[in-house]
Amino acid sequence: MEGELIALISVSAIVLFVIGVPIFLIIAHWVLWTSVVTDFTLANLSLTLFEGINFFGLLALPLFILTGDIINAAGIAKRLTDFAYAMLGWVRGGLGLAALAACGMFAAISGSNAATTATIGSIMYKDLKEGRYDSRFSAATLASGGVVGIIIPPSIIFVIYGFLLNLPIGDLFMAGLLPGALMIVGMQVVCLVMSWKFGWGKIIPFQLGNCVRTGFRSYLGFAAIAIVLLGIYGGIFSPTEAAAMTAVFGLVAGIAITREIKLRDVPKILLHSGQIAGLLVPLVAVSIVMQQILSIIGAPAFVAGLFDGIGGYYATLFICMAMIIVAGCFLESVPVVIILAPILAPIAYGIGVDPVHFAIVFVAGTAIGFITPPFGLNLFVASSTTGLPFLRIVPFVVPYFIILMLAWFAIVGIPALSTYLPSISGM
């Protein structure tokens, strides 16, 4: 009887998803009623909701969100995009290449996919349109570029993954560098080919002086990246402390150096960051409870049993990848990681997959889900930023999706892409 009731609750959750109820409320609905059915008392439910997020490392999540907002408001992100265009604008499709490069650089500060797409999109979409790029392709480029927001360190999702699976967050950050660079380069190849094929984009002369000038003006952005990466890998800061220091640095730079931030703007920036964190943190809490209830009802053992008859390293990994990408099509990365990673990670470890390698494989798969309908969070963000309908952007994302899938297979097949840098970093 219990199984039938849980199945009914799960069907009702699917119905809520179809009619557009927010993911947080859907998971909370499933957690509440399944708790009643499984005798997971409401007292334990409230305690688990609190204790699940009562962890110092998770403070990095709102702090990196705040850092992204401050870097954008301070005009530092705009300086990074200007530098990228000066370096790449001399080739056909150069502005598109610059947009993708700027996504990579902003990702190295913000740690968020949605923030990367929204920030770089708000800066560069108008320039892309004026540069004779197809508006739909421009939006698709910005949506796809945001994918690396959770791969290139720092990454909000790596913070959550490390917390759940008890892995060093610094190792995960380091491991994401080469896969993130591979994904950026792959997308730039797509942008270059598409731009040459359709004649998109203006070509500007390469001027060394302009590169030097815009590079110098971008020093604040590079300094912010250095605070995060060198601070963590040099053993100076923990990821949480690095996030706090970068936020303070960006605020001081925005007020005293670029002067783009006025004191009256600070409450507005804090409010916006708080609104985003206020959406994510409850999602983390209810997802952790959902994962615990799934353990109680035997979901991990059930999934592990499905793998019993499957032989081979790559066959097992392929099925894990299929589960990750399907989940990423429908759910945001936070619940996917919290619910699915503790189930699949032990299976991967059992066939000899390095824990850090599997973490990168897992997060890369969820990242690709950001441009995969029907959920495709980055597609919705790009639609909101550019004003283009969601369905008009989707066809132009397909080439990026294909190259990202190829990059994902390369990440799976070449573990050294993920494990080499952590192995030499001494962390």
Image: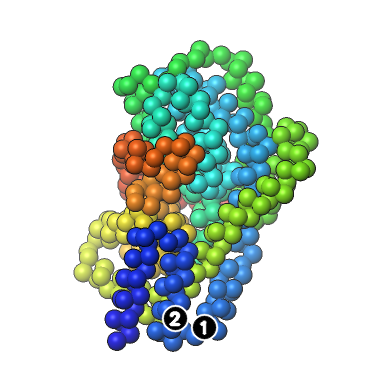
Q: Mark 1 belongs to which amino acid?
A: Leu
| Residue tagged 1 | 42
At x 43% / y 46%, what residue is drawn? 380
Q: Is residue 421 visible?
A: no
301 left or right, relative to 138: left
| Residue tagged 2 | 35
Q: Tell me the element at label 2.
A: helix
At x 68% / y 51%, what residue is drawn? 270
- Residue 297 location (% of width, % of height): 37, 80
At x 61% / y 45%, what residue is drawn? 68
Q: Looking at the image, which residue sits at the far front?
A: 19
- Residue 182 location (% of width, % of height): 42, 39
State the quadrant of the C terminus: bottom right
- Decide: few, some or many residues near mark 1? Use Cα within 10 Å; few <14, some 14-19, many ≥20: few
Q: Earlier in the sequence, mark 2 or mark 1?
A: 2
In the image, residue 364 above or below residue 290: above
At x 59% / y 74%, what residue is drawn? 51
Q: Mark 2 belongs to which amino acid?
A: Ser
- Residue 107 location (% of width, % of height): 54, 42
Q: Quadrant of residue 62?
A: bottom right
In the image, residue 31 above or below residue 352: below
What is the C-alpha distance between the residues marked 2 and 1? 7 Å
406 left or right, relative to 249: left
Asked if the residue at tag 1 contacts the one at tag 2, i.e. Cβ–Cβ closer than 8 Å, the answer is yes
